[in-house]
Amino acid sequence: MAKKAPERITITAALPYTNGPIHIGHLAGVYVPADIYARYQRLQGKDVAFICGSDEHGVAIPMKAKKEGVSPKEIIDKYHGIIKRSFQDFGISFDNYSRTSAKIHHETASDFFKKLYEQGDFIEETTAQLYDEEAQQFLADRFVTGTCPRCGYHEAYGDQCENCGSSLNATDLINPKSTLTGAIPTLKKTKHWFLPLDRYQGFLKKWILEGHKTDWKPNVYGQCKSWIEEGLKPRAVTRDLDWGIPVPVPEAEGKVLYVWFDAPIGYISSTKEWAEREGIDWEPYWKDKDTKLLHFIGKDNIVFHCIIFPSMLKAHGDFVLPENVPANEFLNLEGNKLSTSKNWAVWLHEYLEEFPNMQDVLRYTLTANAPETKDNDFTWKDFQARNNNELVAIFGNFVNRALVLTQKYYDGIIPGPSEFREIDHEVLDTLRQFPARISDSLERYRFREASQELMQLARLGNKYLADEEPWKLIKTDEQRTKTVMFVALQIATALAVLCEPFLPFTAKKLKALLHLEPVQGNETDEKPPGWSDISTSDILLPANHQINKSELLFRKIEDSEIEKQLQKLNATKQANQAAKTSLEPQKTTITFEDFTKMDLRVGTIVAAEKMPKADKLLVLQVDTGLDTRTIVSGIAQSFTPEEILGKQVTVLVNLAPRKLRGVESQGMILMTENEKGKLVFVNPDETGVTKGESIN
């Protein structure tokens, strides 16, 4: 009978933008859980392809290049190198880490587009897009900022709101502004190709809402449900830019593929690159129906990986769909949102320099505090406590005592046990349960829970030694001491195997201390125990096995080291506050004629209510004297509907109407901030005009 091939699993981790280094938010949200899962599945004997690469076509790339006065190529080369090296040094075990500037990716993405194009899966539309007259270019994605129509956040980008995670189009923004010149953009017609997501509404409803209601995480399922039930709309897959993959059709000169069309295809091209290097076939990892495809992402990428990319794969017709998309929430830093632009982050490459050989401490802290169901906060004090009180005091303490006593009493040779007592059987029986307990948590993507199961095993070992006290027992009962040490070393061996997904550097060091790795060329050495052996074998480390001299697995982190990091963050906070209080540069000059086009009038709020499912939006009815009109305003976190009824306000009445979450807003209420930063109305009482009169 032929041996059955191992289960095949393709694991992807979100492609990081090469406009900056990796920080702890990226690690906690995506790369640490993905690496834990990949390492765990390899230990189960699965055929794993763990795939990633640098996303080098995002609009953030040319933006960064303009800011630094260099070419986009220089930016992507710089940060691709930093990111790739950081991942390697941190122990993220990608089977392949590619880049979307690679030839194989350009070819793969172009071929994917052409197949959908030739099948008639796109619709062509000429639409009005935001255009910067001063820069003489269309404003795609992150070249435009404004107010989010979903939550009212004032610094949303044209592709996404980083506050609520909503996916947006640039034309959705309220009060859009060009990031290139600061100018207010105009609308200009341009032709683009759209993926009609509405065609896949039925498929997505059945596949996600009916097929994954119980096995997908609530945050993922809930966001997908909201999008599908609101009704899907065509999504542009091309952009007017000079940086990216050229749209491979003759009539699309000067246009490139939208980054969120080409980036997920990067998983496929990276797999191709890996398979070509390894001399294997890439197609089963993406086209075999028995392959398990998983996407590890942050919550801000849910829509792209659960709605848009699956629709692309469905349209193409040759690919499997993801079985799960275990997205995490966001990680904050010392009570504030991580921010690349404000340098409010712990950068991985800097951490590796400042805490050498302590990769596993950060891995463990980020896993034990993983933002799996809600946003969590990283603090340096918690980092210190996790290390000193758990890794050092529990895990490291147990292993060190077991190995030091073995060296002291038996010259590092595992003693043969005498008669096992009830406590020994209980401990060994409990030990055998841990692989299944940890596996159960990992298979449900509960990495935080799994890490604490591992720590429970170390606690079991500590308690066993504390209860049996072999350092005292050796004076009265040498045979009993041998049994105690034998049992303790079985626990240490299990820890060496089971900690590998979570603490790979520690696992390697502990295996070396226990002399578990076979000596190269020594055929007499037995195969070291694996994951399944812990549940089934009576003996993991046999008597007479020689272990090596003990070394500490972890070191204590001193208060001075933590204080240094806190001072570093405090300096960043002060710099940000100084920048915030400094005067902003004058905006683009306008003419008097431009100003006179604004029709500002005094109105009265006659009705107000919260916008459903939007924390920051109020729907107002304002009597302008001309009429009573609906205005959607992002002031719900500063005012309740009740307290602004009857309030006189200044209204820009000739602003072009815009739909916000399905409600047409027919004007804008003018607001400002007082000296305390509190949002206040521009006071009509100071204008000297009455309701309905023009202020100009």
Image (tube, rainbow, N blue to C red):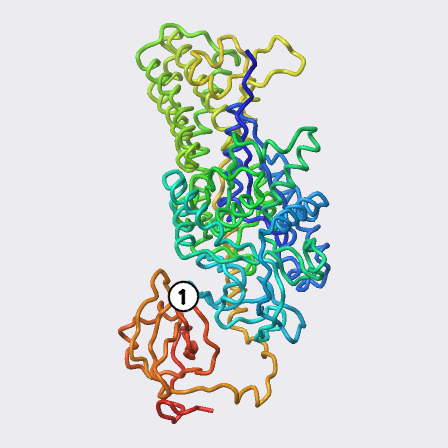
- Which is more toward the observer, 455 or 323? 323
State whether residue 306 appears in this view: yes
Q: Residue at x 70, y 32 (%)?
A: 277
Q: Is residue 160 left or right of residue 394?
A: right
**In x, y percent, where is residue 343?**
55, 58
The answer, for residue 359, to whether it is visible in the render is no
Location of mark 1 (residue)? 662
Image side of residue 15 versus residue 559, left or right:
right
Question: Does residue 68 appear to the left or right of 126 in the view shown?
Answer: right
In this view, the residue farthest toward the bottom is 688
Q: Nearer the viewer, residue 29 or 245?
A: 245
Judged from this view, the residue extending furthest toward the left is: 642
| Residue 111 percent across, percent down from the top left | 67, 46
What is the three-letter code of the residue carrying label 1?
A: Gly
- Secondary element at tag 1: loop
Residue in the foreground of this view, choosing between 5 and 436: 5
Q: Residues within 10 Å of mark 1 (few under 14, many from 20)?
A: few
